[in-house]
Image (spheres, grey):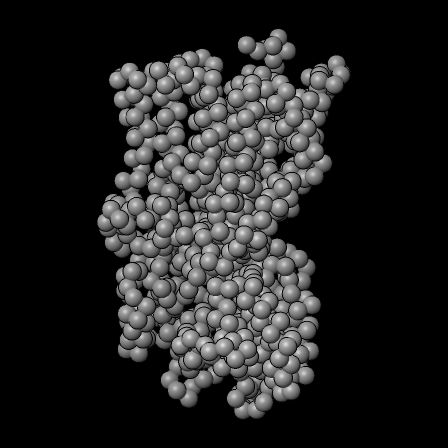
Amino acid sequence: MYTSGMRRSMHPSLLAILIFVITLGTYAATMPMSITLEDAGLFQMVCYHDGLAHPPGYPLFTLACSTLVISPEVMNGNLVSALFGAFTIVVFFFLLLSITRNSVVAMSVALAYAFTATFWAQSIIIEVYSLAAFLLFLCWYTLDRFVQHKREADWYLACLVFGLALSNHWPLTMLSAPALLAVVWPRIRSLLSKLTTLRFFLTTLLLFALGLTPYFYLVTPPNDLFGVYGPINTFNEFVDYVSRSSYNDDKSGATIADKLAFLSWLPLETIRQIGFPLSLLAALGVYYSFKTAPRHQAIAFLLNYLGCTFLLTLMLGFEFDRNGQAIFMPYPITAYGSLAIWLGYGLLAISSLHRLMAAKVTQCALGLFVVLTITFTNLPFNNRSEDSWVEDYFSLLLGSLPEEAVLFIDGDLLSFPIGYLHYVKELRPDISVYNWNNLTFPNRLTPVAASKSKREQTLTQFIETSNRPIFTVETKFSPVSSYGLYDQFQLPGMDNAYLLPEAEAFLDTLSDMYDEGRIFRQQELELAEFIFASFTQLYIRYQKQELTTLNTEQRKRFNRLLGTFSGKMMLIEDELGRTDRTPNKPLLKEVATAAGLQMPTHIIKKQQARYFYYSARILLLEPPEAEEALRQLEQSINLFPATANLAYCLRNELLGIENSNGCDSFTR
């Protein structure tokens, strides 16, 4: 029953419409209009071409977006997430209205959740997380109605929605399942009694199974599909795909220290969602929810938060660096719903202090203050309406290739945006784009499961027999001609470097953005570092050619590249690899010291380990400094043991330990 004050308020349905319009309008105004990184390019390809998303498959989202994405434009795909995000906030509003019986607080909390850092970020790019939140809170709401009104229809609907939630993102749904159990706990005895009746049990099972039927989609697409690992042909492949065993989140380099670091980082990431001052209000709300809310709901709030944050951290094996944090960031999207709810209970706690604070106008003012504070706190990070440099770079890369070229690429960072531009927007239809590992694109030269030797043999044969110009963004063979944007395979004796004016102009723009701090998302920073490294290598090679010199502007550009960490790493790598003379140890020590002092926080552990390995190599040049080199090698191994073979081998050599066969090719 609503209070008389609520009867005088706007009808909840009208408030819900207003919430939907505000939320969707804000998302549409701040979403990117060009391709971004993350998994955006993959989902654009999958949705536009009815493909297969990466494990666990997300069949419900794929079915939905395949229906809704009817245009190759980026905004069409992003609007799918925005729609689900706006619907989530409407359901969240009704859930809070049911729990708090206060329309002002419910509306404030719903909009606060809409503009938390993570929910906003995931609702403006094509992703599965806003749909995951929608289904979870819809299930929560229907279970709450079942508990309050004891209607079997609400239970049946909750079973169907729970099945659908599992068909979208089963790991996050299962982590939130304890919270749903807490919601229904007051009716658990009567529910268990009902489940002993055949009709109720069969209806429950049927509707739950109906929610799982989207999984049939995973085995229906044809062989020539877009998808990271290609089609699913057997039951075992289906199980592996859905269970994510083929896309394991566990990283062998992660340790207990990484888990502990994540656990200490999570509170800070939670605070980032709404800002520190409002986090104090949410902390008050935790206490007030246990004091005033139904006990089962207060426990549900807590379990929902812990499930997709601390429990998930203990289950995963991510390395604690900026890359691991970036991958983890969207996972707690539903957990932050509890944070918003606690914020609402903080507002209710303030309202209980004095009659003036309980007045409707005061509650409205406080609610508006909370929503605007969160919105403007997170707007700089989530306003991506002007983001375009990623698409500009890859469009330049594709556009500058000669006619009928063949381009090989590798890694999600390159494959997804290039795949979108080529296969969805049909940029440069005359060229052929392949993935080195036969992933993502339908034109696989060998099956994904082919052995490494078979794959390499097929690739080598393809390259040697093709009469088309063949390029790669990452060098795999030699000799090549370098262009900065890519390398071209050449016949022996044709190893050259070329400076493209349009590429140099883009490099100036990117350097300005980097220096001004306008590139700050982790994957964008990684791409920028990759570009700086590629062009530094190009300039070094260009200067080694006979009859080529850098002009004043190019020299200035090269010095600017050497001012970056990645530029210094390329200079060190080139100098250490010199065969025409002894590497210049004083120069290398100076450059390595400068690189260590400026190493950005976004550099991942693998690259940090590489830096310390190079530092050890430098120390071992004549005259050798073995003791300090050993310390550098140990630091390299501790940072990234999974790929520290070089460091292991060099350390063992220094210690007089016999190396394995895998070290035979490793030299100083």
257 to 118, vertically: above or below: below
Name the spot of residue 230 as percent of width and height, x first: 30, 54
Q: Is residue 441 shown left or right of residue 19? A: left
Residue 179 visible in image = yes
Name the spot of residue 117 as percent of width and height, x first: 59, 41
151 to 76, vertically: above or below: above
Name the spot of residue 628 as percent of width and height, x first: 65, 75
Q: Quadrant of the N terminus?
A: top right
Question: Is residue 28 or residue 637 the one in the foreground?
Answer: 637
Name the spot of residue 294 as percent of width and height, x first: 56, 18
Residue drawn at the location 49% of the way across and 82% of the way down: 667
Residue 379 visible in image = no
Q: Quadrant of residue 556?
A: bottom right
Residue drawn at the location 44% of the way across and 49% of the way down: 73
446 to 294, vertically: above or below: below
Question: Is residue 299 or residue 392 the one in the foreground?
Answer: 299
419 to 371, vertically: above or below: below
Question: Is residue 220 or residue 7 the one in the foreground?
Answer: 220
Q: Residue furthest top?
A: 4
Q: Quadrant of residue 352?
A: top right
Residue drawn at the location 70% of the way across and 19% of the way down: 351
Residue drawn at the location 68% of the way across and 59% of the way down: 516
The total of numbered circles placed on residues is 0
